[in-house]
Amino acid sequence: MPTEVAFSTSRTIQAQTDLGHAATDLYQRIRVLADCRFDSDSTVEITLVLVEAGGAPGHLDRYLLDPDESVQRTYEVPGTELGITAGPTQSGSCDIDVWIWGYKAPGE
């Protein structure tokens, strides 16, 4: 199967939260879908952090999503691992979803 789910989470957050990590070295490309559900109290900031050898050399991308907004982006393989964090920009809670799919070329 050339495309598979590498990471997914659906959560309600009220503060900056580490959502987890996704191995990206297995894929040629990844596709990220992130959303802030319509009933959220605040805009959410979702950050994709490059992780190499236990350190974090920088951010791959950052999304600021208002309630009822989503984003979908594709990236060439960004290193070996991504850390995913999220936090509301104001007081209140945010209901969020983050999905990452990885693409492998046939035969890999």
Image (cartoon, rainbow, N blue to C red):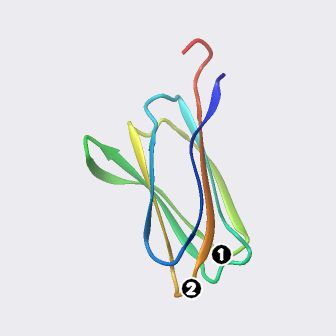
Q: Residue at x 39, y 38 (%)?
A: 79
Graded by Cα atoms within 10 Å as few (under 14), some (14 to 19) or many (20 or more), the crowding at tag 2 reads few
- 62 is higher (above) or lower (below) than 31: below
Identify the mark at residue 92; answer none if there is no mark. 2
Quarter of image, res 108: top right
- Which comes sooner in the sequence, label 2 or label 1? 1
Q: Secondary structure at mark 2?
A: loop
Quarter of the image with the N terminus is top right
Please give left or right for residue 96 compared with residue 89 in the image. right
Residue 72: give x, y in percent of width and height. Answer: 66, 52
Q: Nearer the viewer, mark 2 or mark 1?
A: 2
Q: State the residue position of label 1.
A: 66
Kind of residue indicated by mark 2: Gly
- 72 is higher (above) or lower (below) than 2: below
Residue 95: give x, y in percent of width and height. Answer: 63, 70
Graded by Cα atoms within 10 Å as few (under 14), some (14 to 19) or many (20 or more), the crowding at tag 1 reads many
